[in-house]
Image (tube, helix red, strand yellow):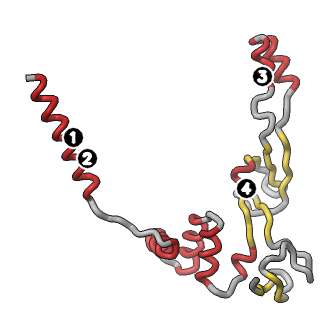
Amino acid sequence: MALIKCPECEQMISSQAENCPNCGMPLRYLACPFCNSKDLHSDKKGFSGLKSAAGFLTFGAIGILAGMHNANDVRLTCKKCGKHFPSSQVRKVDLTLLSTNDEKERYVQLIAHGRVLEAIKMYQEDHGCSLQEAKRVIDEIRGVSEDNSDSGCATVIAALLIIASLFAIFLL
């Protein structure tokens, strides 16, 4: 457990806390992928009786099933920008990652949570480097080696030449 600074009141708090015990600021929340607002409203699309009735009249019994299409999908609406998006596009904000003093630890935590692209973007913004350079550094942190050998292309070309030769032999 590490101590971090609350982004709101700047008091030292546990990095495992969900909210700051001093000011109540949430440290982990969901945000709009378009404007980063945390003021979201969720709707369950649900079963539509009107869609089912129209489907039944048009297609018979199979039309009732059409009314249940996407019945369990959750749709989120941002109250700030008014945009609608599926729950799969929601942005997960973890302020504890941004509050750590150790720069490399922020990237390691993002990578550990499966947010590699976010780590690359953050590195690029922090250091003002190119996307390629940021990716190279994050891949080093992840322990992923970059293989730049061209042997894959040579193998494919050789295989195609062999197949073309065999094809030509059988045709002649």
Q: How far apart, in angstroms, are the residues tagged by discs 3 and 4?
A: 28 Å
Q: How far apart, in angstroms, are the residues tagged by discs 4 and 2?
A: 41 Å
Q: Earlier in the sequence, mark 2 or mark 3?
A: 3
Give x and y (percent) for residue 139. Answer: 48, 71
Q: Which residue corresponds to mark 4? A: 90
Q: Which residue corresponds to mark 2? A: 156
On screen, residue 75 versus residue 147, left or right, reads: right
Q: Earlier in the sequence, mark 3 or mark 4?
A: 3
Furthest residue in direction left, as rendered? 172
Q: Are marks 1 and 2 in contact (CB under 8 Å)?
A: yes
Give x and y (percent) for residue 126. Answer: 58, 79
Q: Residues within 10 Å of mark 3 (few under 14, many from 20)?
A: some
Q: Identify which amino acid the numbered label 1 is placed on.
A: Leu
Give x and y (percent) for residue 148. Answer: 32, 65
Q: Which mark is residue 160?
A: 1
- Residue 150, quarter of the rendered image: bottom left
Q: Residue at x 60, y 69 (%)?
A: 111
Q: Nearer the viewer, mark 4 or mark 1?
A: 1
